[in-house]
Amino acid sequence: MDRKTFLKGLVAASLAAATAAPAAAQDGEPIKIGEINHYKRMAAFAEPYKMGIEMAVEEINAEGGVLGRPLEFVFRDDQGEPGEAIRIAEELMTREETAMVTGSILSNVGLAIASLAGNREFVYLAAEPLADAVTWEQGNPWTFRLRASTYMQAAMLAEAAAETDAMTYATIAPNYAYGKDAVAAFKEVLTELKPGVEFVAEQWPALFNIDAGAEVQALERAKPDAIYNVTFGPDLAKFVREGNTRGLFEGRQVYGLLSGEPEYMEPLGAEAPEGWIVTGYPWYDFEGDANAEFVSAYRERWDDTPKIGSLVGYATALSIAAAIEKAGSTESDAIRQAFEGLAVDTPAGEITYREIDNQSTLGAWVGRTELRDGAGVMVDWSYKDGADYLPSDERVRELRPSE
Amino acid sequence: MGLFLAQLLTGLANAGALFMVASGLSLIFGVTRIVNFAHGSFYMLGAYVGYSLMQVLPGAVGFWGAIVLAGLIVGIIGALVEVLVLRQVYSAPELFQLVATFGVILVVQDLALMIWGPTDLLGPRAPGLEGIVRIMGEPVPQYDLALIAITPFVAIALWYLITRTRVGILVRAATQDREMVGALGVNQSLLFTGTFFLGCALAGLGGALQLPKGGADLLMDFTILAQVFVVVVIGGMGSLPGALLAAVLISVLNVFGVAYLPQSTLVLMYVVMVAVLMWRPFGLLGREEVAGELGQVGEPDRPVRPAGTAVRVLVAALLAVLAALPFWGGSFAVVLVTDILIFCLFAASLHFLLGQGGLVSFGHAAFFGGGAYVAALLVKYAGTPMELALILAPLGAGLVAIAIGWVALRATGVYFAMLTLAFAQLLWSLVFQWGDVTGGDDGLVGIWPARWASDNDVYFWLALVLSVGGILVLRHVAHAPFGYALRAARDNAPRAEAMGLDTKRIQHAAFAFAGMMAGVAGGLFVFSKGSVFPNEMEIARSFDALIVVFLGGVKTLSGGWVGGATFKGVEDLLVRFEYWRLALGLLIIVVVIVAPDGIVGGLRKLGERLGLLRPDEAPRGTAAPAAREPAE
């Protein structure tokens, strides 16, 4: 009885799966793109990203679509699990017949999809994952990445740090791959630019489980000239509050990786730290350029302010449309070749997907934090082109063993 | 000296909220014997409700009023959950209720997202307590001092309630022997509801009290849960002074760990837990559980029978249909069913441990992930071919299980479960931390099957053979003398030992065997995904298996894989919808209420009632457990 019932269910489920098999794509049928993300587990980040994609798709389709066909994204939730993401990617590429796959915020999920893409030979655009390994150590010809990587953003902050007099540094970063990469890159670039600097303390709180009071005491004990912060989300809020309360930041320059992004800055409200040098997205101060146009269009469309994810999502859809247009077909290999060296006009300027490592040259904004009307903003910011913060070509070839 | 004192104070302040949440969990477990997985959700609700109240209530009175109100409201929600959900399943097998609490977690997650939105909320500061006090030159936040003052107050109030009031006497009596309390005419339902109210109120209070030190976010339910479990276990389950002691111990150790061993943040508390439990297997102030005290709630297990010829023929036919899936199913169906098969073997291996051995493991993912990592590391560093890696994966997982079982089997019941959890976490943090070898969070990628098996269809057949084969082996072992001995050790250890069975050794062997079978699943998993990440070892994966085993039915032979297949299949369908967690959570709760014997047990009963199945001939319900096994 038990087995029979189970198998019946299984047969029924499989039949349902089989009958839902798609018809072959014809002219005028939409070009489908698979988008896998952690819509529930990281809703605060995934939602603005999705809204950016949807806005771009509406614009693209209003102008006639891609190759004369409408562009359509298939959004799927992977629960933040690499194993689930793999299965969904397989489903998208086989049953949904998507032309390529994009998505993920978490680096481990991104790496899992990238590995599958390399094996099954379909194109994966890692939009948000920051891990350097996506394009370097674990890079493969089928995986491209849009955002400025951990290394690039850390290098931007290290450059800013090298210009100050601070000689002793303490670092605080979540105890996992991203945190470690971010600290290693910062150390590498800063020591190169300013050989005398010393790192006097390294703190590694557990991700999303920071003991902020203890971390602040430990940093204070090291008496550094400057602090490099990689914590984010709820950890950042707790760290900033304890640090402010206990006076950790007084008389110290703090560098915050991603701390200026609206996703992290807005929840802090009036308690946002002042005077930190951060990478982020100062959407509130754009004037008269493509960035400003994007911001006003976004606010009009969604009645909400943009986050960095909105820009990334928007640029993701633009990149994909450009690649397929250039490829002239939806064949995987044609799209892959089109992506190599592809130039795309984004609100942040023209970016190129480098042929050497499939990394785009999208940059980031670096500025100083300040309070304005009870909210943290970036001032004195400038846009740093990602192309200027990548290692030499020889080094990249070393880092990228697969090619 | 000043710094030392300041660090001590930080630790004590952290202990406050932790103690409140932990004491609530401990209280609930002590009286109702429910391991409340949803306790972290009540903590999260406390933070959110407290935050919302603080937005409307003004000033210092409003702030503290909001905290108290948050506790009360969360307590009421907890009492509602008890009445609506848990009360329906008190007669179910031991620990079955934790499945229902797991459903509650999912429901609360989606409801909180709906009500409060995805953005993290920064908690307001306590009015009048924003600043710092300098103690021996070191800054100490005023709110920390307030927390240090409040905690003893709550602890003393609890102590008074438990030791000096009639309610407390009843609660203590129920902790020691709830059947007797019931027999003496105490209204147990009221007592249980009251305990749930109090326990959840404490969790809510803890959540609201930590607002000025952080805030409310959607991930805090799980982040606190592991910590709270550790505190409750170290202190001794059911012991309030133990919870206080353990909360202080863990919090203070954490602070010094952060200062002097910054990399230790992931492992420290698990190391402490293992050390304490090896020294005192029932926690610092816990009471040794009298054998059989928990008893087998609900009706006793039925004897296991090998399947009849008709069933065997039917299963063989259906397996043949399944094996032909690549010819009639879509290409994605093959991928999905491969995933399901692997998960079924994983669930079946835990089910063997639980159902046949009566050993509830909260850390079974250690062996699934362990097998996966053994295979992946072998491929990565030794260039091992897939075939050999698939053989060595279960051996590696089995070795890990032998080592863990050697320590964990010193304890029994929930303490055993907690030790397995601690070891699984230790292993997880080893993999997570040791980035040079394991790739850490970035995992090991590019582990693909051998050329002959690289096609999805071929790999499906491989998974089918190994998974179904593994499940059949597990079944066979249950019918072998070893299975009988294992059930004897489960049902009545003293009698089994009197008959000359070395029960510990039998359980150890069963633990290693189950670990090995999970390792087979782990090995299959790596090659089907091409990569492995620490996720495959984390608590959530252990819970996945645990939930499906209970959902399928512990007291049946097929519960493990039926639960696994149903759960995975339903999940794959539901995840396509926006509020899938809410739907899945509600579905789990409904299944728990409708079928307290699990899916298989429920269907069997239904079949008997409709006359489709013949009830067992063995005497039911009245016989002593050891007498239930009929001779073959």
Image (spheres, coloured by chain):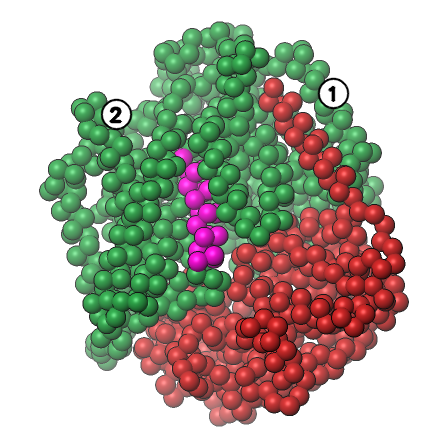
Chain colours: A red, B green
Please state the horizontal and vertical placement of residue B402, each as a whole percent of the image. Answer: 51, 36
Q: Which residues are magenta?
A: B97-115
* Closest to the observer, B494 or B111: B111
Contact check, label 1 and label 2, Cβ < 8 Å:
no
Question: Relative to B261, is B512 on the left or the right?
Answer: right
Farthest residue toward the left?
B164
Residue under mark 2: which chain is it in? Answer: B
Please state the horizontal and vertical placement of residue A67, each as a whole percent of the image. Answer: 86, 67
Which secondary structure class fits the magenta region best? helix
Q: What residue did someone put label 2 on?
A: B179
Q: In terms of image quadrants, where is residue B142? A: bottom left
Residue at point 42% right, 71% down? Answer: A237
Residue at point 59% right, 58% down? Answer: A38
Please state the horizontal and vertical placement of residue A6, each as a whole percent of the image. Answer: 63, 27
Residue under mark 1: which chain is it in? Answer: B
In this view, A393 is above or below B275: below
Q: Could you tell me how many numbered marks the image carries?
A: 2
Q: What element does badge 1 sit on?
A: helix
Quadrant of the frame with the N terminus of chain B: bottom left
- Counting residues from the start of the chain, the first of labels 1 and 2 encountered is 2
In this view, B394 is above or below B613: below
Residue at point 55% right, 73% down? Answer: A303
Give the amino acid at mark 1: Ala
Q: Name the mark on residue B502.
A: none
Residue at point 42% right, 74% down? Answer: A268
Q: What element does badge 2 sit on?
A: helix
Q: Name the mark on residue B317.
A: 1
